[in-house]
Image: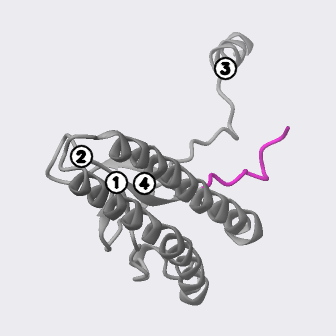
Amino acid sequence: MVEEIDRVEEEDSNFLPCQSWQITPDPIVIRGIGNLTFGLNSRFSSEFPCSLKGKLAPEEFQDTMDRINFVLQRNIHSHLRWLICGLIFCCCSMGISLWPVIYLNKGVSLNLYLTISAVKETLEQENQLLYNKLGFNWKLSRRPVENTENLTEYVLLIETLAKIPLSVPD
């Protein structure tokens, strides 16, 4: 009988009874609803996702979306200005010189980079102030547009952070 007990202990030595596997749910995707300019929408939907009910207050979600949309509104209008200026320069030179358009295109890409950086910075502030404490993490991510393979767009992802099990020893 002692041999059986020893054998059972030897077989189960690799198994930890407190070990548990956590499955994190898929992130919530919030797509843009405004005009699409260079892959970035001018607005994001502020409709409260059903999967966040009971986990997050709708007012907090609305405040975050208002902040993000304000950053986009402040920066996207300058994208359109650069595009219109490029078209005017191209038309004025009757298409002979494309240099102003190429130069202005660099300004557009720089402005797009600054807009994306501003949105990411806003999301980081929101994560640090509120969402990481609630177990969420917001990210700006580039995803393919539905029904097409060649086009990509920026979307907001709300990821659920894995909770640290308190019953497991260090």
Type of amino acid at the residue the image marks with label 1:
Gly
The secondary element bearing badge 3 is classed as loop
Q: Nearer the viewer, mark 2 or mark 3?
A: 2
Q: CA distance from mark 4 to mark 1?
A: 23 Å
The residue that appears at 34% across and 59% down in the rendered structure is: 83
Q: Residue furthest bottom?
A: 59
Q: Residue at x 34, y 53 (%)?
A: 38
Q: Regarding mark 1 in the picture, which secondary structure is present there?
A: loop
Considering depth in this image, is 143 or 4 the residue closer to the camera? Answer: 143
Q: Which quadrant of the rendered structure holds the N terminus?
A: top right
Q: Residue furthest right?
A: 170
Tell me which amino acid carries mark 4. Asp
- Mark sitting on residue 26: 4
Query: Residue at 60% across / 57% down in the picture?
Result: 120
Label 1 or label 2, whichever comes before in sequence order: 1
> Where in the figure is residue 156, as x and y percent of width and height?
46, 61
Find disc 2 in the rendering and name its residue: 151
Question: Which of the marked residues, 2 or 4, is nearer the chain's N terminus?
Answer: 4
Callout 2: SS? loop
